[in-house]
Amino acid sequence: MSWKSGIEWTSATWNPVTGCSKISAGCLNCYAERMARRLQAMGNQRYEHGFEVTLHSDILTLPLRWKRSKLIFVNSMSDLFHEEVPDRFIEEVFHTIARADWHIFQVLTKRTERLRALAPRLEWPENLWMGVTVENQACAGRIDDLLSTEAETKFISAEPLLGPLDTPLDGLDWVIVGGESGPNARTMQPDWVRALRDQCITSGVAFFFKQWGGVQKKRNGRILDGRTWDELPYSNRASQHKLIA
């Protein structure tokens, strides 16, 4: 349930929850759903129920056994704030994050109303980066829910970016942008990406361009205007470690 990640903006994944359900436009061609179905067909016991929400309590404390500092994406195969995940389980995940303070954890959700409701009950250690997915302007309200939390480092993932995004970046530390990949991938316009990059530069927000996407994402690459953009929101803790190999 954890391995060195191929996701460009992290170094490892930890999946105490797998499975999800669609709630907005960005979910239409979900990569995690495709992967879960494939793993189910291969007989992986973690995915015997396919993409149904499944809790894996046996690995709730797994990061405590990783002694070398890592940048860890929490639930790359789910949404921690899914309505089928009990409040107590979310609190236990956050407690593990607080205990494993030599790592940095990235939590990303689309279910920001629940994030906002639970935030007062959760621990908010320095090594937790809290993010929300904002795939188009219709989802920009999720940023307000994020800003209401006590997370020290806050970010948005505009992936898949499905349209122009014009929203203030005040209070944010990081913006990830990426195009959709895989079968039926929807096209991302370069001007949408450049507008967000330029706004990040003006606002002093770290900018990370993940990929152009498409059916052949490796061929399309991740070069934007002649270079890669790999900025991270280096807090004091992050700056002490090289967390992406």
Image (tube, rainbow, N blue to C red):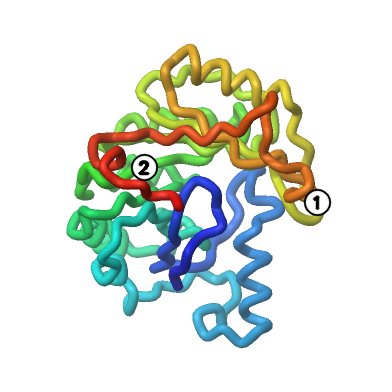
Q: Name the residue under label 1.
A: 215
**x, y percentage for residue 244?**
43, 49
Where residue 130 is drawn, which disc sits there?
A: 2
Q: Which of marks 2 and 1 is in front?
A: 1
Q: Which residue is drawn at 70% across and 45% down?
A: 180
**x, y percentage for residue 53?**
49, 69
Q: Residue at x 45, y 28 (%)?
A: 206
For numbered disc 1, what is the local secondary structure?
loop
Q: Reading the chain from its start, which is encountered first: label 2 or label 1?
A: 2
Where residue 12 is drawn, which disc sits there?
A: none
Outermost residue on the top side: it is 202
Image quarter where the N terminus lies is bottom left
Q: Residue at x 63, y 18 (%)?
A: 195
**x, y percentage for residue 209?**
59, 35
Of 178 and 79, nearer the camera is 178
On screen, residue 61 versus residue 208, left or right, reads: left
**Residue 142 showing in the rendered view:** no
